[in-house]
């Protein structure tokens, strides 16, 4: 049975607010055509999607739905409570993938999976494989940790992806029945409760936008307002972990569990935008600002604590114990994207770029068959290689693992890469905005007609970007370029060879475009030293190297034979030079003393300093050549000699 | 019924090896008479012991035994699985306390508690309130996390304390029946298994020493040898957490869960000493050396990870995320004490002093009614005051909590303070060794007769120590003084006003002493700056201040009005001067920039530097004056100015 085709107005990207500075484009409007990002999207298409599906078949996470439908599921549920959500994130990824590039074989796989999920839905709309059956906990008996509404949210998000791709199919009907059930159970006449893990909020607003059903928006608003009032039982990690310590509108910085915090903030902003709640939107913007200023790694990663996967305090950003969970990076992009659509402010696109390139892309291995759950900025020991057919715990290895007990990251990568093209450009009534750079085409309609253009570049390794207009309205229109913060004041745009004035974070070309018009953007890509704020104690006395949008790292694999990261200093007076994809830097290896007691009332000094050049590689590419150690932050000075005893 | 009096040969301190360089003294041989340490021991006697007992009555942990005896205990067990051990640690504390200072009322409380425990023992000797009853897990069904043998170990340790105090009572009989049961279940003809949490090993060797039953030593040896062979199911934290990745004799550094690692190493050394296993003893000594050199905080605390309460990698010693669990400090003292008795090497007494003063004593609040579980070296935010009548999770607050869900630390403090006098001095056949300084008396017998002396000092605040001989054999004898590492080469000993030669880590006075002989030791207590090894990334560019054996800290409470720890630098060129118990230092407050993005390609600079003097206080005394922030490691330099955006 063919999918019903959704009305064209439903089409669009992830997040389609009814109002805002910018409008998202749909999967039929912006497509990657080659280069760096196309490679990543094809890796997802050809490897990661199948990897996720095979793993979830093999270990019974998809089979849970079949057994639920057959009535044979009970205490023998496969996996932890919320593995349903991984199946839904895969469905979302498949939906975006099909929207981007229709494919009969993939469509058939998608439909089969939807049918298996649908078969498990109960008559009243409830759909979860871990609750409510004989031998299982009762429905909604463990809102703190059971993740029921979280799973529902991911199913609904998958349905939204399907609608935005132009298909109104069975999954959408499943989501409607489920969302209606949630409205009955938790709506104005339902129980006064929230889910321990936010996600339903953002899903309900998006579903409301995509279906036009106002009840879903109403319910999302209710969940946002209920939170922060102690409805959840705060146990070992306290109420802050659940974001249940403070109403969203009263918080000034993101805190607690990083993924929970960012999903909630995204949902809260969606509610605020749709309801015109300026105070709530302002609170979320303030939280973003303070979090970026004080609680974000240079990679864009967030979350300083392994124990509770939480944000740390202000400036608590240890590189070696960075949690910087892949899912938190994805959640950060979700929030920044919403703020970008709302305001048009380039700073949000800046953080999206930083986080995509330096946190999220660090997760998948080059071959797409293993993933980092956490993304450390300093690896001290080689560690061990996870088995390719074993399920890992989430943060045990220095190398990527094929699958995890809590395997939220691989499927989150899958849905993000399947839709990453949608973050590259937006439109307004009068023009197109280019936020990210790569090889991609845009074809859309603005108020005065159709506009079509092609962007080509060797970015993120090269700073030259060209834009060719293929079609344009016969009226003034604009094309604007985001200028990354590190390039502001030094970036140059030309139209047909003529410089365009502008030195801010956005340079806009406004004119009556003709097919064949060419624009170029030049971004200065010279490698640069970056120094951390003095309040970040954990990296005092170190520098990082950045090249354009990429954070570099020193991986032990690239050291001359016999050298190790211990005792290495960066010579910050020497020039940094570009290589094909990296940066050549001058290092000094010092023979570090090995005393009985590592605290001295004298000074410490290395012995036998040796200088040499080494190539730093993009951080996102590390750990693809076997076990290694790695640093992003490189020490620049070593104090003198000493001896001591305990 | 009076306790049977144990033979005098059984009397002694914690750890009574059959061979070794030094012999421990018993509670009747060394007693604190006043000053700093006597205050701590009296706080324990008058407040902490009662605090622990009241809490465990109130929340049913002692009541578990009553209900077990009545047969009414089942799924409604109070507290987590291993709360029996807290009752046993309290019993051990009471035993030492009674050995130190007999008291009818306390004896009666002790006996009542023993009777309640004894009543719960099963006919086959098994004794645990969490396993084996209807509704409870089966005995030994969860060796990884159930802590059954761990609890048994603490009961046995309590019995050892009773025997060493000269009493062979009901508790000892309970322990015999229990140890015999364990021998049957886990001995040469029993199951091939170990407990997830070591403790039984050290207890069995000590019980073997105290009872003369060689089977207990044999069983301890079996447990030590079985470990590291994958008998435990390694789940989320891996085999290293349990020390089950590598046999004890093959490890070169302590790793995994810090308390587990140190209890195991202590038990392994006990086995090695009793069996003459030089290789095993050597392995433990190497582990101690490497751990002290690379995995120990300046406070003596160990454990860098909150997630798994584990040692970090070499030089991974973040001050702000220091776990440095109180129990790990106590376990470290247990191991160092054993190595000191074995070798007589002053370095072990040095670490005992450092850890007692700067890690363990930081745990109890001045009033003895609240405790730190973890002992951070850097507190960033004021945090909240725990309720005085609520059970805390273990690491949630910046202020000490009265009790914890896992409340291992308060009772461990109790048993340590009740016996801390026993760590001050030892004897050999020919003399007495003074390892720690305070006001205390020693009366013991050496080969040539009785020797009695009194030590008096204002230490740890003052470096003048005087020793008065009260009685001495009519033959040559020796009194030796440990010279702390920071004083080696600068300490001076006099006998009756005449200087004694010696400049090493021990200065020994050998002569025919007469009653009335006076010795003095002068330790140089000038405050000093201490610089961390360059491999400790987390404190690069900072210094600590030490004064004698005390690590100092800067607590926000001591800052002038309106100043905060953010942006503070220590002027390391200015003089440090002594105050009554602290150190006056010169600080510079800088106005730190607050950028939108905390990474810059320019330099950072503070504005409006203001210099002023502030008193640093002993770290162990911090957080006794309400919520505050605190640093041990003080930055000494701040780089220049910059601005940036994400």
Image (spheres, coloured by chain):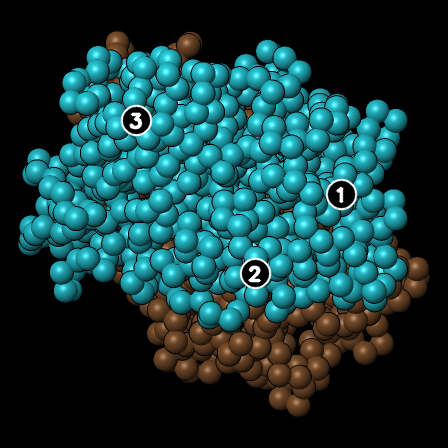
Chain colours: A cyan, B brown
Task: Tell which tag, 1 or 3, sits nearer the viewer.
Answer: 3
Alpha carbon distance from label 1 to label 3 = 43 Å
Q: Is residue B8 left or right of residue B345?
A: right
Asked if labels 3 and 2 touch by Cβ distance under 8 angstroms, the answer is: no
**Does label 2 or label 1 sit earlier along the sequence?**
2
Query: Do the residues at pointers 2 and 1 share their chain?
Result: yes
Asked if A158 appears above or below B267 in the picture, the reply is above
Q: Residue at (47%, 55%) from the top-left corner?
A: A45
Q: Residue at x 63, y 13 (%)?
A: A277
Tag 3 residue: A515
Q: For the residues marked 2 and 3, what is the alpha-carbon distance in whole angstroms?
A: 37 Å
At 75% across and 76% down in the image, what residue appears? B177
Crowd band around label 3 with a 10 angstrom C-alpha radius: few (<14), some (14–19), many (20+): some
Residue displayed at 17% across by 36% down: A527
In front here: A473 or A573?
Answer: A473
Left or right: A29 in relation to A468: right
Task: Please say if A34 is above or below A332.
Answer: below
The circle drawn on residue A173 is: 1
Element marked by disc 3: loop
Q: Earlier in the sequence, mark 1 or mark 3?
A: 1
Kindly state the secondary structure of the residue where label 2 is placed: helix
Q: Position of residue A542 (x, y in %)?
A: 23, 37
Question: In front: B76, or B111?
Answer: B76
Q: Position of residue B18 (x, y in %)?
A: 48, 76
Q: Are marks 2 and 1 in contact (CB under 8 Å)?
A: no
Counting residues from the start of the chain, the first of labels 2 and 3 encountered is: 2
SS at mark 1 in the image: helix
Question: Which residue corresponds to mark 2?
Answer: A105
Q: CA distance from mark 2 to mark 1?
A: 22 Å
State the image quarter where residue B150 is shown: bottom right
Chain for mark 1?
A
Q: Is residue B463 visible?
A: no
């Amino acid at each position: 049975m063919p999918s019903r085709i959704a009305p064209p107005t439903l089409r669009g990207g992830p997040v389609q607010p009814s109002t805002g500075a910018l409008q998202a484009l749909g999967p039929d409007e912006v497509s990657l055509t080659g280069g760096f990002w196309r490679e990543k999207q094809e890796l997802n298409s050809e490897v990661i999607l199948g990897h996720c599906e095979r793993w979830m078949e093999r270990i019974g996470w998809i089979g849970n739905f079949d057994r639920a439908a057959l009535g044979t599921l009970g205490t023998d549920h496969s996996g932890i409570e919320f593995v349903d959500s991984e199946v839904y994130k895969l469905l979302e990824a498949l939906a975006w993938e099909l929207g981007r590039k229709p494919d009969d074989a993939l469509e058939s796989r998608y439909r089969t999976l939807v049918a298996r999920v649908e078969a498990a839905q109960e008559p009243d709309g409830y759909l979860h494989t871990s609750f409510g059956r004989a031998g299982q906990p009762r429905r909604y008996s463990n809102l703190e940790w059971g993740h029921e509404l979280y799973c529902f949210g991911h199913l609904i998000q998958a349905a939204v992806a399907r609608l935005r791709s132009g298909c109104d199919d069975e999954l959408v009907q499943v989501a409607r029945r489920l969302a209606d059930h949630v409205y009955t159970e938790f709506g104005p006449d339902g129980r006064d409760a929230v889910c321990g893990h936010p996600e339903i909020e953002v899903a309900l607003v998006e579903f409301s936008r995509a279906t036009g059903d106002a009840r879903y928006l109403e319910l999302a608003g209710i969940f946002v307002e209920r939170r922060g009032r102690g409805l959840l039982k705060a146990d070992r990690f306290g109420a802050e972990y659940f974001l249940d310590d403070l109403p969203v509108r009263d918080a000034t910085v993101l805190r607690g569990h990083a993924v929970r915090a960012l999903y909630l903030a995204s949902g809260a902003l969606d509610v605020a935008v749709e309801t015109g709640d300026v105070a709530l939107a302002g609170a979320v913007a303030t939280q973003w600002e303070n979090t970026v200023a004080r609680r974000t790694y240079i990679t864009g990663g967030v979350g300083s604590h392994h124990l509770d996967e939480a944000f740390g305090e202000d400036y608590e950003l240890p590189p070696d114990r960075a949690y910087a969970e892949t899912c938190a990076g994805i959640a950060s992009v979700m929030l920044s994207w919403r703020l970008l659509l709302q305001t048009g402010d380039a700073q949000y696109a800046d953080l999206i770029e930083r986080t995509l390139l330096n946190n999220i892309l660090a997760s998948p291995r080059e071959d797409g068959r293993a993933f980092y759950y956490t993304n450390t900025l300093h690896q001290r020991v080689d560690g061990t290689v996870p088995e390719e057919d074993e399920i890992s715990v989430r943060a045990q290895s220095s190398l990527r693992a094929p699958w995890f007990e809590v395997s939220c990251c691989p499927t989150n990568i899958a849905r993000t890469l399947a839709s990453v093209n949608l973050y590259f450009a937006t439109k307004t009534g009068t023009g197109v905005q280019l936020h990210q750079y790569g090889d991609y085409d845009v074809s859309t309609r603005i108020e005065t007609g159709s506009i079509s253009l092609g962007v080509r570049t060797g970015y993120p390794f090269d700073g030259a970007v060209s834009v060719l207009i293929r079609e344009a309205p016969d009226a003034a229109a604009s094309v604007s370029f985001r200028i990354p913060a590190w390039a502001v004041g030094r970036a140059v745009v030309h139209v047909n060879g003529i410089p365009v004035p502008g030195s801010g974070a956005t340079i806009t070309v406004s004119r009556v475009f003709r097919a064949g018009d060419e624009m170029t953007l030049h971004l200065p890509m010279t490698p640069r030293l970056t120094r951390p704020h003095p309040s970040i104690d954990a990296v005092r006395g170190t520098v990082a190297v950045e090249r354009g949008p990429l954070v570099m790292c020193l991986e032990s694999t690239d050291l001359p034979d016999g050298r190790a990261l211990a005792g290495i200093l960066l010579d910050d007076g020497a020039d940094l030079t570009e290589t094909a994809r990296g940066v050549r830097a001058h290092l000094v290896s010092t023979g570090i003393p090995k005393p009985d007691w590592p605290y001295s009332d004298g000074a410490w000094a290395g012995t036998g300093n040796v200088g040499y050049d080494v190539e730093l590689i993009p951080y996102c590419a590390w750990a693809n050549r076997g076990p290694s150690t790695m640093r992003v932050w490189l020490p620049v000075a070593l104090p003198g000699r000493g001896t001591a005893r305990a």
